Structures are given as structure tokens and as C-alpha cells.
Image: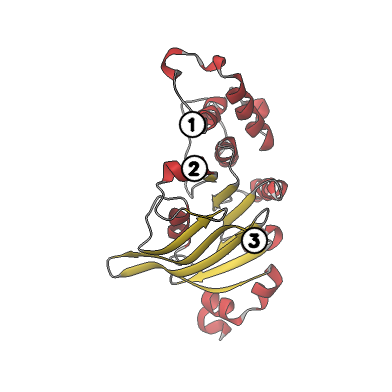
Amino acid sequence: MALLETHGLTKSFGALTAVNAVTLRVEAGAVHSVIGPNGAGKTTLFNLLTGAFPPSSGQLFFDGKDITGTPSHRVAHLGLARSFQRTNVFPALSLLDNVWIAAFARNVSRRGLTWRRAQHYPETTERARSALADVGLAEKANHLAREISHGEQRQLELAIALAAAPRVLLLDEPAAGLSPDETRKMVALVRALRGRYTVVLIEHKMDIIMNVSDRISVMHFGSLIAEGTPAEIQRNPDVRRAYLGGAAA
């Protein structure tokens, strides 16, 4: 069953069509990767899925409901959370505080925050600590975000997404800038999320894509040109041409 689905989703910026009539089905519990050369429209597609951009045309469905044009703050409350290409944390706050803010923002009501200390929200604090534990950062909960490594900051960003209690995680190049050891750790984290969450992944490192994906969609110049299992994508001549040009022709 498709948890996240698009029908002819399109986004144009003037004469440039960054996403062109994309129809996509993401099955519940799957790791579904979106790949393609630089400029293929992958991040723009993520921005459409999360409400950062309104589509020029087409429809977006989440759990069978039409959420086309829903703004990003409402999309987050529906159960879609994302990470970004560039690390996006509060460097002067502790790891726990970074994650606590995301956990608190997901609450149904924020009434009374002005008058109550954070310790008066034990369930929020527990959810934040649990998210840190999920990514292996529980022991550094009280460290400042600027004091940890780049790889750990990427793990922290994943914990922030998890603290929002999502049903779908959209991860935009989570291994960007990571060392080989840090990349292996991130791959293990994504694998551990399989089944617990539905994951939509953008990544340029093909070894990661082939190792963690259930299905792969390939974008080129804003359009979907192929979809299938990792083995099917590896054999697809259109995909090889998109990445290698004339060398694969």
C-alpha cells in the first residue's frame, strides 16, 4: 500500500521546469531512494513533498488523503519529517535541547510554554532522549552541538527528524561530507530504521543506495526515467546513459 503518492507533480520556475509530471508511489515501511545527476530535480521534489514549495500542477497524497498545497508546518504535523543537504542544527544548544525543540513542536498544543520550564514536559524529554539513543548519541546529550564532529551532527539532524514522531522520513543526502567510517555508521542507522519508518532517501553515493534501498526512482532533467529494484536499476540502459552520457550509449 502506498503511504506517499504523487500524480503528475510539477514545479516550474518561470521557463524552467524543475520537476516535470512526476508520478511516484512510496510503499509503507520501505526505503525508497530517489537518484539522478546533479540538477535532476531531486531536492525540488523533496521541497514539494514537504510543503516547502507549492506545486505548479499535479497532486500529492499522504495516507490516501490529498495534501496538495499544504504548508510545510502542517505537513510536519501530518507525519512527514526531513533532513537537509546542509547540516541544520543549533550549534550553541546541547544535543538534547536541539532534539527537545523538535519533539515539543510536534505536540498537539504548545499552550503554557511561556509559564513552564522544560522539565515540566517529561514525555517530551523522554521522546528527545529516545531519538538520541536511536542514532547513538545518548551519551553526548549534554554536549553542545558545535562540539561534536560533522558526522555526529548529521546523526543529530536525523535524531531531530525522529523526535518529530514521523511516519515518513525524507533524508536529503545524509552521508554528504562524511568519512568512510562515518558513512558506514549512517548506512547502519538507515538500515535500522527500515520497517519502523517509511524512508525516502536522496543520496549520490551509489554503494549506499544499492545496499539500503527496496526501490529506486531515477530522475533526469526533472522527469522520472526509471523505477525498480536496485538490480533492475543497475541493468537499466536509460539510467546508465543519464549518468555516463555517451560512454554508456
Type of amino acid under label 3: Ile
Q: Name the residue that disc number 3 marks.
A: 209
SS under mark 2: helix
The spot of residue 64 in percent (x, y) is 56, 56
Location of the N terminus by quadrant is bottom right
Would you say 232 lies left or right of 38 here? right
Type of amino acid under label 1: Ala
Would you say 181 lies left or right of 248 here? right
The spot of residue 179 in percent (x, y) is 62, 48
Q: Name the residue that disc number 1 marks.
A: 105
Kindly report which numbered mark, 2 or 3, lies closer to the viewer in this rendering: 2
Q: CA distance from mark 3 to mark 1?
A: 31 Å
- CB under 8 Å between discs 1 and 2: yes
Q: Residue furthest left?
A: 14
Q: Which labelled disc corresponds to residue 76?
A: 2
The spot of residue 44 in percent (x, y) is 43, 59
**Which quadrant of the figure has residue 241?**
bottom right
Type of amino acid under label 2: Ala
> In terms of depth relative to the viewer, which is nearer, 134 or 26?
26
The spot of residue 50 in percent (x, y) is 46, 50
Would you say 14 lies left or right of 156 here? left
- CB under 8 Å between discs 2 and 3: no
The earlier-in-sequence mark between 1 and 2 is 2
SS under mark 3: helix
Q: CA distance from mark 1 to mark 2?
A: 9 Å
Location of the C terminus by quadrant is bottom right
